[in-house]
Amino acid sequence: MNTSANWMRVFGMIGLSLWLSAGALAQPSAATSSMSMDLAEVRQKALAETLAFNVLESLTTEVGPRMAGTPGDASARVWAIAKLKELGFEKVYSEPVQYPVWERGRASCEVVKPYPQRLELAALGGSIGTGNKPLLAEVMMFDSVKALTDAKPESAVGKIVFINQRMLRSKDGSSYGPVVMARVAGASLAAKIGAKAVLIRSVGTDANSRSPHTGVMRYDNMLTRIPAAALGNADADLLERMILRGQPVRLKLDIQARTRKGQYTGANIIGEFTGSEFPEQIVAIGGHLDSWDLGTGALDDGAGVAMTIAAAKLVTAQKRPKRTIRVVLFANEEQGVFGGKAYAESAKAKAEVKHHVIASESDFGSGRIYELSIKASAPEIAEMQPLFDALKPLGIEQGENDATGSADFGPIGLLGAPVADLKQDGTHYFDIHHTANDTLDKVDQVDLAQNVAAWAVFTYFFANR
Ligand SMILES: [Zn+2]
């Protein structure tokens, strides 16, 4: 009796649990499989599309360089508004962003002694100039930022400091951080030990190019401001060889960069498709519209602009989204994330931060995406399995839950909006980053399509789940 009653109970429990699990799975699996089919369809369509390349071709051809505060910045905004309208975005508007304007001016560098010849260089963004007459001084080489930081006080009085630290190649861009300190902080570190100017080996992985890599630098307000410029890697090699021969090397440096007085008013350009069921909920994607002035900003960040515009268009062409899809084209990321900070402030003022379902920027060129990481809790991530499954055929793995949203969605991420990173292969990104070689021909159309497919799947999932 007892035994039989126990068996009955056990069978009953097994039966109940089987029924429960079947029932529990039955409903979500129908929704899940319909979502999975939609995602597969979006992915296939996007892989066959050329819209992103066409948008990028248009931006780089019709606008080209668009450094903050230049005429190119203004024409990029005109271009963006027209392009979003042409593609059928339902709401197209701009939000003002203020920033100072830096002017590059001319820059030249000559070795005066002992081996007279010219070197290729570019002033760093934010640098001051050398004044009315060129600066003539002996150069003093440091192998790394660390060596410069450790140098004795007054050890470079009256000299031009040359920071000769090489950037290593990395897939995820992690080798950028340690070296970029030379560019960002080099001038103040050199000024601290008495230098009159600083030259850096370009922060870039190309070993066979004279092209300097520009990029933003910062002054420590407590220290004297000195001019700062980057030599292309080939010319950094050349200068290194001269210095290693042992005689003092004298340079003539002429830099006419300056920052204009007052503030310039640019704008974030925003395009939206309104959600049908939850219009107040926002899926925010985008890239930064500004670029440096040396190239045409095809990779940085024309690619991010083009692929997120294309993804939003493709997703909404398939089906009206339940939630609002917003593409943000940020102003002046390069010189201090001005657009990203303004976007977060505006969202806060409009009480929109909490309505962001997800926010993610593309700003790492057009290399293939290999990983998606989302800042969310483990149970939330578990519910996103159809998304990760749909990205697998594109070669994209699920990453750690450590996303930042990239530079421009970073500030709203800090205010609590959920952010994601679609991590791209950056093995070759820093060969041309911030150089005159950042042009359309560097974009691989097959890789670009893989990016668009991933962004379309990602956007569709969050807009319609
Ligand atoms: Zn960028």
Image (tube, helix red, strand yellow):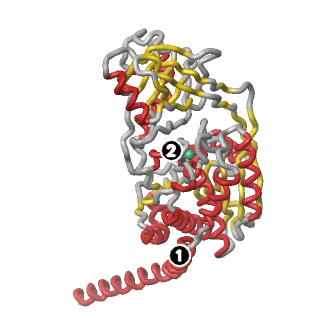
Specify the amino acid type for callout 2.
His
On screen, residue 314 versus residue 367, left or right, reads: right
Q: Earlier in the sequence, mark 1 or mark 2?
A: 1
Q: Nearer the viewer, residue 66 or 231?
A: 231
- Secondary structure beneath disc 1? helix
Viewer can see residue 43: yes
Residue 34, given in percent of the width and then of the height, sits at: 54, 80
Viewer can see residue 283: no
Q: Nearer the viewer, residue 463 or 428?
A: 428
Whether label 2 lies within 8 Å of ligand 1 gets the answer: no
| Residue topped by disc 1 | 44
Q: Nearer the viewer, residue 307 or 230?
A: 230
Q: Nearer the viewer, mark 1 or mark 2?
A: 2
Residue 353, compared with residue 38, is above or below; it is: above
The tag on residue 433 is 2
Q: Give the quadrant of the C terminus.
A: bottom right
Q: Nearer the viewer, residue 303 or 336?
A: 303
On screen, residue 316 versus residue 151, left or right, reads: right
Residue 424, given in percent of the width and then of the height, sits at: 46, 55
Residue 88, given in percent of the width and then of the height, sits at: 74, 66
Q: Residue at x 43, y 64 (%)?
A: 396
